[in-house]
Image (cartoon, rainbow, N blue to C red):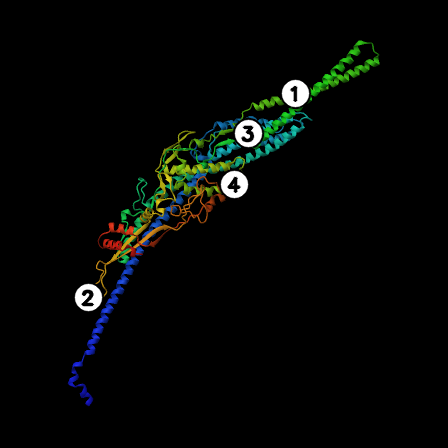
Amino acid sequence: MEKHLKYNDPKHANRRGKIALVALVFLLVIVVLMAFVGNTGHAVKQKMDVQNASDTIAFSGALWMARGMNTITLNNHLVGEATAIGVIHDAIGGPEHRLGLTDNSPENRAADSVIKATSPLSPISRIPSVYIPPPITEVDRRIIDFVTKRTSPVSNAEMRAFAMLYDARLTLKRELAVWLSAKAFANLGYLIPPPFGYPTAIAATITHVLGTAQIVLIGKEWLLLEVVEAYAKLASPLQETVFTDQLIPVLATFAAEIAGLDPDSPAEPPRGGLAVEQIDEMLDRMKESLDVASQIVPKEEDRKLPVVFEPPPSMQGRQGAWPTGWKSDENPIPPDASDKLQDIKDSIDDAINDLDDEIGELEDAIADLDPIRDAIQEKMDSADLADSVVDMYEQELENVSEQIETLRQKADELRESRTEVERQRTELESLPQLDVASESQNLSLRNIPDAMDPEQERLTQWVRATMPNVDAIRAPILGTLRQHCPKSEAAKHYEKWTNRYALIRAWKMRSGMRLRKTGTKTATWEKQSDPYRLPVMIDSFEGDRSNKGNEPWTKSVETGKQQAEQSFTLLVVANRDYESLMANSVLRSGQSNGMTMFSQSIVYNANRQTNTNGSQQQPLVGWDTLNWDTDVSTVPEWGAEASAESSRWPWQWFSSLEYAPKVKLNWQAKLVPVTAGRLELASEELEGDEQKAADFALEHVDLISH
C-alpha cells in the first residue's frame, strides 16, 4: 500500500510521458532517415535503369549498324562470286562465242593453208622406198588425215570460239604445221639411195616417229578443247542470264538499299537505308519498353552507315601501257619442232654433199677408163692380130665398156636422186610459210572496250571482290589444262583471258555497257543497262584511285580521330521524369528536370588492320566492305601469279570455291566513353532538358567516363 501511494505522490506527477516524447522524436528521425535512404536507393535505381536503358539503346543502334555493314560485306562477296563465274566462262570462248559471232582470221587461214599443203606430203615415205614398208606409210597417212581434217576442214569453216580457245587452237595449228613440214622434209631423206642414204634415212625415221607422236598429242588436245567448247556453248548463255542479268542487279540494288545510297545519284552521300530504319524502329520500341525518352545523336536525317559508292568508271580508256597482268598476245612457233626441222634440213644438205662427192668420184673413174678403152680399140685397129689376141682385146674392151656404162648409170641414178631431192625441196620451200612471230588476230582482242581504263579498274572494290574467287575457281582448271593440254598452252592462255575478263566484266557492270552483235563478225559496246556499284568505306578512294587502308580516319591525328568519331559512333541521351519515393513534399528531389544519362557506342571491325600489302596481295585492312580473313590466308590482287591445282575428277572444278580466301564478317558494336565531340553535337541538336544535360556534361566532360 505504501508503495502504491508513493507512485501516486504528487511531487512525481511532472515526469510522466517523457520517454514517449523521446521515442517519438527518435521515431521521426528514423522515419525521415528511412525516407531519405529509400529515396536515395530509389534515385540510384532510377539512375541505373536510365543508364542501362541508355546503354541498351546505344549498343543496339551500333549493333544494327554492324549488321548493316556485315550484310553489305556479304553482299559484295556474293557479287564478286557471281562475277567470277561469268569471268570463268567468258575466258573460254569469249563473249563472241555467246553472241554467235564468227571469223576466219588471216593468221588462221595461213595456218590452214600450210597444213593443207603439207599434209599430203608428210606421211612417212610417201614415195615408196627401200627403207619403209607400205603398211607403215598407210597408218601414218590415216593419222595425219584424221588430225588435219579436225583442225583444218576442207570447207574453211569460220571459227566460232575465241579468247582462250582461239589462242590455244592457233598454237596447236602452228605446231601441227611445223611438224607436218618437218615430216615432209624428212621424206627427202628416203630419196637418197643406199648406202649414202642410210644416215639420212635414220634421221628421217627419227623425225617421223617424233612428229607422228606429236601430231597424235595435238589431235588429243584438239578433241579436249572441243569438249570445253561444247560446255561453254551450253553454260555461257545460262550464266549470263542468271548471274549478269538477274542476280547481280538484285544484289547491287539490295546493298544500296541497306546503305541508303541512291543508284540514280551515286555521288550523293547515303541517307537512311534499311540499317538506319531499323535503328529508328528499335528506338521506338525501347522508349516504350524501357519507359524512357531517348534521342540518338546524330539526328535521324544525318544518321548513316560509313559507306559510299565506289567511283564510276572514268570512260577515258587506257592512258599508258597495259598492266603486267594483262600479258602478251604474241604467237611464237614451238622451238622444238623448228629445231627438228632445221636438223633434217642439215642432214639432207650433208647427204647431198656426199652425193656430189660420189658423183665426182664416179666421173673421175669414167675419165680414167675412157683412155684405156680407146687404147684397146686403137691396138685392135692398128695391126693384124691373131684371132686369139683379137678375142682377148675384144673381151677386155667389153669389160672396160661395161664398167664405164655401170659407172655412168650409177652416176646418172645419183644425179636423178639429187635432182629429185632438189626438186622436191624447192617444192616444199615454195609452199606457204607461217609467220614466225605475228601478233594474235583473236576476234576477242577487237572487242576489248576502248573506254576501259585497266589501271583504274584493277583496284576497284568490284575487281577485288572478284579476283580471289576467279583465282580459286580457275585453279583446278589451270591444273587440268597444264596436265592434259601442254602443247596448246591452254593454261597460259586461260590465265591471260581470265585476268582480262575480270577487269572487263567489272567495268561492264559498273558502266552499264554491254557488247551487242552488229554483224556476223562485228559487235559494239553500247549502254544497255543501269550501272551498278559496290559500297566502299568512306574516303577509300581519292578521285577514282584506290586509297584503301590510308583513309584519313585511320590516322592517329586529331582530325583523323574526329572523323572516326563522326563516322562510327552514336551518342544516346536517355531521360526519365523523377519523383521521390516518399515524402516528396518534405524531401524535395534535386532531379527536377528528370534523370538524363548518356551512352556512346561505336561500330568497328575486329579483323586485323595493318595497312600493309604487297604488289601481289590486297591490303590487310579489316575496316572494309570485303573483310577477307587475312589470318587464314593471303588474298591475291589482280595480276598476281595464278594458283593451279591438279584435279582428278571434272566435278572438282565446281567445288573449287571452297578453296577461295575465307571471309570473316566481323563488324561489331561496343560501348565506349562519351566524347566531347559527340556532346557538342548533342548540345547543338537537342532541345529542352536533354540540351541542358548536354551543356552541363560538356562543362564537366573530364569527369564523364561512360
Image vertical order of residue 635 relative to residue 705, above or below: above
Disc 3 secondary structure class: helix
Disc 4 secondary structure class: helix
Disc 1 secondary structure class: helix
Image vertical order of residue 350 relative to residue 213, above or below: above
Residue where numbered disc 2 is placed: 586
Quadrant position of the N terminus in the picture: bottom left
Disc 2 secondary structure class: loop
Of callouts 2 and 1, the N-terminal one: 1
Nearer to me, 699 or 262: 699
Residue where numbered disc 1 is placed: 416
Whether the residues at callouts 2 and 4 have beta carbons within 8 Å, the answer is: no
Nearer to me, 459 or 113: 459
Question: Would residue 65 appear left or right of 99 to someone viewing this image?
Answer: left
Q: In x, y percent, where is residue 537?
A: 36, 45
Identify which amino acid the numbered label 3 is placed on: Ala
- Residue furthest left as drawn: 10
Residue where numbered disc 3 is placed: 177
Badge 1: few (under 14), some or many (20 or more) residues near its Cα, within 10 Å?
some
Q: CA distance from mark 3 to mark 1?
A: 29 Å
Nearer to me, 694 or 601: 694
Please name which of the two marks, 3 or 2, marks the residue nearer to the observer. Answer: 2
Identify which amino acid the numbered label 4 is placed on: Thr
